[in-house]
Amino acid sequence: MLVFKGKLKLATFMLIISVFFGVLLGVLLSACEQQPQALPNEGNTPQASKTELDYELDALRDLSFLEVHDDSIAAPWLALQDNINKPDYQPSAEQIAQYDSRLQFLTKQLKEDRRIIANRTVQIRDLLAQTVQQETVLHLLDGMAEVASAGVEGDYGSYCQWYVNLRDTKHNHQEAIAKMKQLK
């Protein structure tokens, strides 16, 4: 009889444990099925969600220079760099295409990577700004494209150094480009 009572106690204990875990599982499953309630929006204004492009542009804004694997993002990065004082600036496809066409031309003419051209152009802009000389990235690219079109020997780094030296000697943009074109 002792064995029977022990088995009965064990069976009762197992039944109680089964019921407990069944109830616990039911509570957990019902909690998972409930949808979270949206937080009230102050002023009932619709919230704008960021798109993938917005996140990509935010990441590009944070880049201070392009690295080896960044050739493909050089044109949008330059568009953002040219509008660095406008934190909400969103370049259009046409605006990016302007930078891209100049990069393509200079890459082909000078056999340079797009990122190198982009980085050096931004460096020139920043150097000029330190001496209170303002040039847009697009204007600098156009000037360097003029020099490359004239057949001046050298790489993009050489062009940039000549340009900075000429600007340091108080030549304006057009004068510096004209003097560089005479170097052929």
Image (cartoon, grey):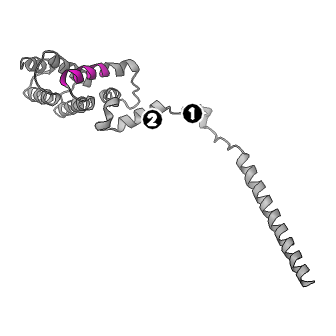
For the N terminus, the image quarter is bottom right
Identify the magenta region. 99-110
Residue that label 2 marks: 55
Amino acid type shown at disc 1: Gln
Quarter of the image for residue 142 reads top left
Q: Residue furthest right?
A: 1
| Front in this rendered view, residue 28 or 8 | 8
The nearer-to-camera label among 2 and 1 is 2
Q: Residue at x 21, y 33 (%)?
A: 123
Question: Quick check: 121 left or right of 180?
Answer: right
| Residue 143 at x, y percent in the picture | 18, 19
| Secondary-structure class at tag 1 | loop
How many marks are shown on the rendered structure? 2
Q: Which is the main secondary structure of the residues drawn in magenta?
A: helix
| Front in this rendered view, residue 66 or 78 | 66
Is tag 2's residue or tag 1's residue first in the polypeptide sequence?
1
| Residue 170 at x, y percent in the picture | 9, 25
- Residue neighbourhood size for the residue with mark 1, other residues' Cα within 10 Å, grouped as few (<14), some (14–19), many (≥20): few
Residue 49 visible in the picture: yes
Q: Residue at x 35, y 27 (%)?
A: 76
> Pointer 2 and pointer 1: residues touching (CB < 8 Å)?
no
Query: Is 15 covered by the magenta stretch?
Result: no
Amino acid type shown at disc 2: Tyr
| Residue 121 at x, y percent in the picture | 22, 29
- Residue neighbourhood size for the residue with mark 2, other residues' Cα within 10 Å, grouped as few (<14), some (14–19), many (≥20): few
